[in-house]
Image (tube, grey):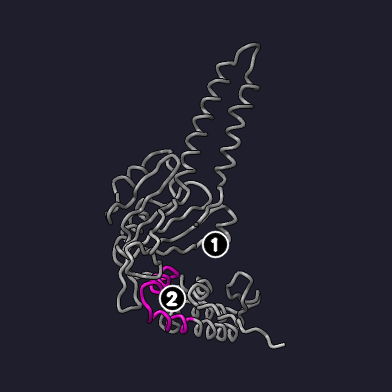
Amino acid sequence: MRTTKPSRLSSFLTYCMIGCFGGCPVAFYEGEKLTGWGLLLTALLLRITLMVEAHIRTMQPKEKPEEPADFDADDPDDKYSSFSINLTTPDMERDFGWEHVDVYKKSPRYLQTVCFGGPPVYKELWEYEIKEDIFVFHRLVDSFIDDLWDPRYEVVNGVVQQRMIESRNAEPDTFVVAPPEQQLAALRQKVEWHEADGIVRYFILSKFRSYGWRNAITKMKESVEKIAVEAEKIGATMGENGWYQLPDDASEEQKQRLNELFSTKTLRNVYGFRSYREWVQRDRIIALLEPEPAQDTTEAVQ
């Protein structure tokens, strides 16, 4: 069963409760009755507390219903078949955030849920299709933003909600991450069929195809070793963050060669990475899909 760490909202909830039932009456008590400001502030904090508590419950991943006794998660033909993968990074975990993907087989879709430690929670439903046993194409079906104050859908059944996005961004008090034109352009690209990449692609292939992706993993390991050799020739070394770095006195030629080595064209055409994302996720992909070495259970001879 997947569990989620409490977010900062839990601390906020605790402080609100203390303020409601302790701080406000003490601060605004006069003689034998509370002042009007004390009652108003207490009611306001109590209202906010109830709203936050309700939102915390909606943020928690729901437990799946108990499956029948004959449920087989490794059988793709089982009508209850579904697979989950936890994509939470150490940085997200430090901030009490999480990310996970639930892949379903009966209807080829997967749900990606992301939380960065507090509202909003982003939920995207994707439809996918496997081609030639190695390609995965997908498109965005639904995009729901579970915000504390403004829950909303930006995509419904593959249709971008342009009017809602434009009107919302036009409101004076709205926090705008990017201009609405950029938001709409990004969503329109997502709702069109396009090739999937990264760890989700390999996860889907590993569950629903028994071959093809295995050769890709072998090639990925070989490519990682080849790139390490080429980076060493340039003078780059692997840093603690997993990135190749040049010394401070590196020449412009060295910098250009390193950029060419990690360009999207070189990674795809020479080393077989579908995208730069797959290179970044290389260690997690290999660790996820590479079979664990068999343990030797033979007892030592005395």
**Could you tell me residue 214's position as x and y percent?**
43, 81
Disc 2 element: helix
- Mark 1–mark 2 Cα distance, whole angstroms, equals 23 Å
Residue ID for mark 1: 89
Residue ID for mark 2: 264
Is 278 displayed left or right of 26 in the figure? left
User: Which sits in the foreground, 65 or 207?
Assistant: 65
**Could you tell me residue 246's position as x and y percent?**
61, 76
Name which residue type carries label 2: Thr
Instruction: Determine the main secondary structure of the stretch shown in magenta.
Output: helix
Q: Please tell me which residue is depicted at 51% across the width and 82% down the height of the picture.
A: 221
Disc 1 element: loop
- In the rendered image, the vertical position of residue 14 relative to residue 3, given as above or below: above
Name which residue type carries label 1: Thr
Q: Nearer the viewer, mark 1 or mark 2?
A: 1
User: Which of the 4 image quarters holds residue 149?
Assistant: top left
User: Which of the 4 image quarters holds residue 232?
Assistant: bottom right
